[in-house]
Amino acid sequence: MLKKIFGAKKTNLMTNEEVEKEMKVEDGQKLGVSEEMLLFGGFQELNEYYFFEGLFVSTKRFKSKVGATIIFSGKQGTYSLPSAIQEFDCDYAKPLQRHVAQISFDVTKAQIKKIQAGHYETVEFKVKKHSFLMTKA
């Protein structure tokens, strides 16, 4: 009934390629892609403690108070990274027509080498009831 009064809202979402053209990622590289999500990531070290800094650009909104997990899977095995922060939320980026969140994950030096070498085929981001499966970019 409300659609009749206000009219149906037609939204033409930007494609992943259009989103990437609008973004300016200074640090990191594109690691995963799916219809629902883009993942950009880079690494940082603080006193011999390593972090994977993930930038998640999603068509769906997500948040958590209990953390998240990112899983890299490939022929050489599977490795899981727990989030370094437990509570996070994503923000809507109107120009990109996507929800964006930057999340830190604990990572080992060996895992960094595997990710940088591209020793994975898929990346799965798990947060609460959501699971986003991406292929290697």
Image (spheres, rainbow, N blue to C red):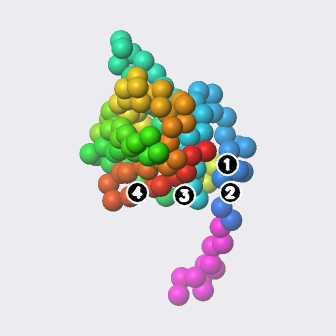
Q: Please name the residue shown 41% across and 30% down the image.
A: 111
Give residue 15's mark: 2
Disc 1: which residue: 19
Measure the C-alpha gap from mark 3 to mark 4.
10 Å
Disc 4: which residue: 131
Measure the C-alpha gap from mark 3 to mark 1.
12 Å
Residue at the extreme front of the image, as rendered: 75
Looking at the rendered structure, the kind of residue marked 2 is: Thr
Callout in the foreground (3, 1):
3
Residue 12: x %, y % from top left: 68, 65
Measure the C-alpha gap from mark 2 to mark 4.
20 Å
Q: Secondary structure at mark 2?
A: loop
Q: Nearer the viewer, residue 63 or 92?
A: 63
Q: Please name the residue shown 44% across and 50% down the image.
A: 124
Residue 31 visible to the viewer: yes
Q: Is residue 7 above or below residue 81?
A: below
Disc 3: which residue: 36
Looking at the rendered structure, the kind of residue marked 3 is: Glu
Callout in the foreground (2, 4):
4
Q: Secondary structure at mark 3?
A: loop
Measure the C-alpha gap from mark 4 to mark 1.
21 Å
The question of residue 2 being in magenta is answered with yes
Residue 40: x %, y % from top left: 56, 38
Magenta highlight range: 1-11
The question of residue 32 being in magenta is answered with no
Measure the C-alpha gap from mark 2 to mark 1.
6 Å
Q: Is residue 11 left or right of residue 79?
A: right
